[in-house]
Image: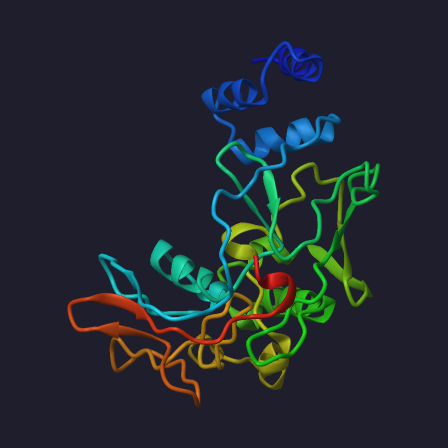
Amino acid sequence: MKEQQIRDLIADVKTGQLSRRAFVQQMIAIGLSAPMAGMMLSQSGVAMAQTALPYKPTKAGGGGVLKLMYWQAITLLNPHFAVGTKDQEGSRIFYEPLAGWDGDGNLMPVLAAEIPSKENDGLAEDGRSVIWKLKRGVKWHDGMPFTADDVVFNWEYAKTPETAAVSIGSYKDITAEKVDDFTVRLTFAKPTPFWADAFVGNYGMIIPKHLLRRRQIARGAAQSEAGRHRSLSVRGFQAGRHAPRQDQSQLSHRQPAAFRRGRGQGWRRRGVGGARGAADR
């Protein structure tokens, strides 16, 4: 498909002659991903659909048991070291990104207050920067606030080669700058149409600065050492001891284990107190 044909399809979406979903399907047919197709529409002035979550929790935390059955045990709960689906989904129970994708390639805010766009001055005209505004009132499970400092720390953590993070490709060529406690500016080395990579999706999950800053990656912390931090969540879960094999790192917490592997029962989560504020969605 030639460029002009794609531009004509985008024009049809703008005028309502072609649905957003139909456009995304046609782009997938020629080898593009749904997120890329959605970004093409966004850059052309077509607003992303506001996806409504079908489930609304009545409270954060609570009782009961959550069982997750996997073909293989989860081995790491640090998303920057998650080398497979099992570790990514295990980490996702505890950590969240600024935004994620729905099935139609729309960006959905998670820890972000809104999706950056030209209309809200979140996207620069030259394609070299994006501004993320964070939700207010979100707290880690120990009561510490989630702020722009956590976001900037994750950029520094992931981009540093000594960390050996699998997510380094999303962060090494950008700069993250704290504007205020709830605003972060990302700057790219060149115009970047697909700007929704860092802090989005699986590699966008954010870990707490106040627990990891003592193990600064500049000291060359090894992957196994970095995986031993106490896991705190903005989702109302806490990690208990996790040692599927003797050579694997452990995640421990002083309180009783809240997430552990049962014999023949996969992974189980015990009820614990939940996160407070805007994280209670």
Q: Nearer the viewer, residue 32 or 34?
A: 34
Q: Residue at x 63, y 76 (%)?
A: 209
Looking at the image, what colour scheme do you see? rainbow
Label count reads 0
In which quadrant will I find the C terminus? bottom right
**Residue plotted at (37% across, 77% down):** 258
The picture places residue 135, in percent across and down from the top left corner, at 70, 59
Seen at 63% across and 16% down, the residue is 6
Q: Is residue 121 left or right of residue 278?
A: right
Q: Residue 242, located in which quarter of the rendered image?
A: bottom left
- Picture quadrant where residue 254 is located: bottom left
Residue at the front extreme? 58
Measured from the top left, where is residue 126 in percent x and y?
83, 38
Which residue appears farthest toward the bottom when viewing the image?
Answer: 254
Give the residue at x 62% y 53%.
198
Left or right of 222, for residue 136: right
Q: Looking at the figure, which quarter contains the N terminus?
A: top right
Give residue 44's quadrant in the image. Answer: top right
Q: Is residue 269 above or below residue 115?
A: below
Residue 136: x and y, percent?
A: 72, 63
Above or below for 256 versus 82:
below
Question: What x and y, as percent, mark residue 19?
Answer: 58, 17
